[in-house]
Image (cartoon, rainbow, N blue to C red):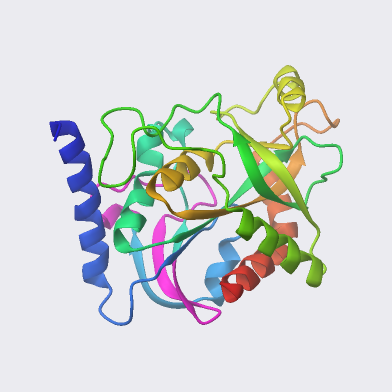
Amino acid sequence: MIESERTATEAVYKAAYYIKSKITEGDIPSICIVLGSGLAPLADGCEVELSIPYANIPDFPVSTVPGHEGRLIVGTLEGKRVFMMSGRFHHYEGYDTSVCSFYVRVMKNLGVTTLYLTNAAGGIADSINPAELMVVTDHLSFFCESPLIGPNMEDFGVRFPDQSQVYDPEYVDMLMKIAGENGIKLHKGIYAYMKGPQYETPAEIRALKNMGADAVGMSTVPEAVTASHCGIRIAAVSLISNKAAGLSDKKLSHEEVMECAAKASSDSCKLARLFIKSL
């Protein structure tokens, strides 16, 4: 085994062991939910058994973005034991994409089989408006440094993983069915990753639109790539927080993102709860 691979693998095992040592009652959850913008209130509806600050977990990075609390929750939601990541990590905070997605391998080592990713994204498709939701069916990762660069971690997956169905088609169908039955407006679409932290230029948005992107954001893809490498089933939902650059007269701001996320929070949380219930 190459030394750097061994070191990285041992870091995953060490973090997983620490988390496992704190769960003194009940089974280890097999579901992990990442609470992106607008989904933070979901934690309030969870029977929280344990809350661990990221700073306490060996080798975990720390969230620095407003709205990302920075703690791992263990609890019960809709009768299912779950992990909740209250806050995530971004490349624009100075972390390599492999660090941004470090927690995914930790979750895999703990026995997680389903990853529910959420994010706030700028709307590109004409048919998708702010405060609406979009289930991700595929992504564009051209501007994302692969989190798999470097020695392959053989314990978690193959050197050249297939990316034909990163987002589980059955989960996409489940989410669309749930939304339709509960009056939640949910679109299907392709998510494009951009590094940030600056918002995209109108020219970049035109280019992404021509390539088939329906929404754009600064997260999710590194985690999805890592989860697919690990063999974890993925569902991802974007909360459309604004029209992307050049598609409206509004100046883009993080305040607008948070305000719009709050408006759509009810539908976003309801969809997540019903999805977890249906698993």
Q: Is residue 59 left or right of residue 44?
A: left
- In the image, residue 242 sits, relative to residue 42, either above or below, namely above
User: Could you tell me which quadrant the N terminus lies in?
Assistant: top left
Q: Position of residue 133 (x, y in %)?
A: 73, 53
User: Could you tell me which quadrant the C terminus lies in?
Assistant: bottom right
Camera sees residue 180: yes
Magenta region, residue range: 54-83
**Residue in view at x 63 percent, y 41 percent:** 138
Q: Is residue 146 left or right of residue 194?
A: left
Q: Position of residue 224 (x, y in %)?
A: 49, 44
Q: Total of numbered circles in the picture? A: 0
Q: Is residue 32 left or right of residue 278?
A: left
The quadrant in which residue 96 appears is top left
As for residue 77 lying within the magenta part, the answer is: yes
Camera sees residue 256: no
As for residue 201 lying within the magenta part, the answer is: no
The quadrant in which residue 26 appears is bottom left
Q: Is residue 247 left or right of residue 223?
A: right
**Residue in view at x 67 percent, y 25 percent:** 200
The quadrant in which residue 150 appears is top left
Q: Position of residue 179 (x, y in %)?
A: 76, 65
**Looking at the image, which residue sits at the far top?**
203
- In the image, residue 278 sits, relative to residue 35, either above or below, namely below
**Residue in view at x 68 percent, y 69 percent:** 270
Q: Position of residue 231 (x, y in %)?
A: 42, 51
- In the image, residue 7 sits, relative to residue 201, either above or below, namely below
**Residue in view at x 50 percent, y 28 percent:** 144
- Taking depth in this image into account, of 218 and 138 the one nearest to the observer is 138
